Amino acid sequence: MQKTKYLSIIYLVALTVFSVSFFNIFLNVKGHQDQAFASGNFHVSFVESGKPAGTCVRVPNGNRYFTYDITATNSTGSPYKINYLAFHSNTSGCGAYDSTIGSSFEKISGKTDYQPGESGNLTLRYDTNVYNCGRTQYDAGFFQTDTTYSSTVFLGVVVDYGVDCPVSTPPPAGGPTPTPISTPTSTPTPTPISCIEDATVILSGLPSVLNSGQIVVFNASINNTGNTWWYHGGYFQFVQKSGFNINPTYGHYTPSMYSGDVRDFTFTLTAPIQPGSYAIQMQNVHRAGADYEKNNSTICRPAVSNDVYFGQIGVANFIVLAPSPTPISTPTPTPIPTPTPTFTPTPTPDPNKPAPVSAPQRKPTLIPNPDYDSLYCRIYRASGGELNPHPDPKCYTKFYKR
């Protein structure tokens, strides 16, 4: 939505009730006089600093900047946007004015687009040193972006510089007006608003060799090197241009990315099952339906009708290895069992059966050996067998009695 159209409609439609919505906005003060609230399901409140109370202030007043810290909450089911603009008249005073677009009412930080359920903050600031004559009117309002345009002004201030800006002096009355010598001049070519959407991308941390199905983590660093503002994560995204399984599926720019900002994302990648060489590619995309805006929310190019990829393509190469073959198991031979020896029990003796009687040992009777008679034998026999050891075994002959 063009801001000129936005504020033109605000004033064409709302000027009939301007005395209520503009000059009496501070009648809805809650707590103290520099806070206002808009009614409805899109809630806006703000705190102003540096500006005296009132909807028309005289400058200089000792403060160069008038700052507005705005808080917004979208409790509806539709998207909303906050816009703002300044107008300047060469005539001083406090009257409402919306004919000539001025400058110096700018966004310092925060977000202007709010999806259903979103909340956020926005800081706007007016620089009183930009002009030194006439008067400036600056306004802010919100509108629903997915339906017929209808806006609500929640902030409106006239800054009165106290003196009119000088105008060219008309020729004196009476007497002929000298005809000036015509000097041919070239028609100046209007300088188009620069609108460059660009980015650098660095992918890091992805291993160069992966196993089949392995899950790894890698990082992406994006630098907004253009001069445009990526003002909403639903319209500006960091996506992959290859078909790998990554999580999250894309980088969501929330909060928004101003020119010069750097954003880091962390992704996980699941390696393909098939072995081979691969390359993941990721790039920024400008989604259809989103206009091009500068850091100060000035529209520098209308919305595109198709998705537009822009900036550097980040690339990371890797190899997926083939799965290791399953080893063939060698069967373990069944051991041959060792035979258990058979136990033969010892018979228990019968107490009623008498034990067998051993045959008595027969003791031999020694008789003198008549066939052998020696001195020693006679001495042994004469001693009555006292002589020991036996002097000669041949002295006796064993005789067993039956």
Image (tube, helix red, strand yellow):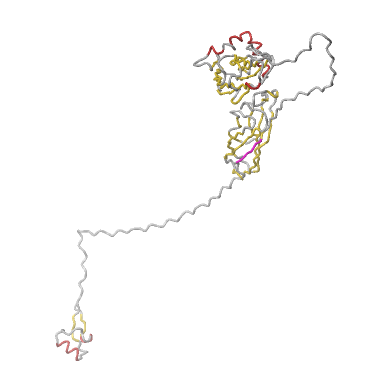
Identify the residue at horizontal 80%, vertical 22% (top origin). 187
Q: Tell me, yes or no, if residue 113 can be seen here.
A: no
Q: Is residue 379 above or below residue 348?
A: below
Image coordinates for residue 274, horizontal then vertical, percent: 63, 41
Q: Which residues are magenta?
A: 200-204
Question: 92 or 286: which is nearer to us?
Answer: 92
Q: Is residue 73 magenta?
A: no
Quadrant location of residue 147?
top right
Question: 135 or 16: which is nearer to us?
Answer: 135
Quadrant location of residue 169?
top right
Image coordinates for residue 87, horizontal then vertical, percent: 66, 17
Q: Tell me, yes or no, if residue 229 can be seen here.
A: yes
**Which quadrant does the C terminus fall into?**
bottom left
- The secondary structure that dominates the magenta segment is strand
> Most extreme residue toward the bottom, as rendered?
375
Question: 38 or 182: which is nearer to us?
Answer: 182
Image coordinates for residue 284, horizontal then vertical, percent: 66, 32
Q: Is residue 244 above or below residue 131?
A: below
Image coordinates for residue 111, horizontal then vertical, percent: 59, 24
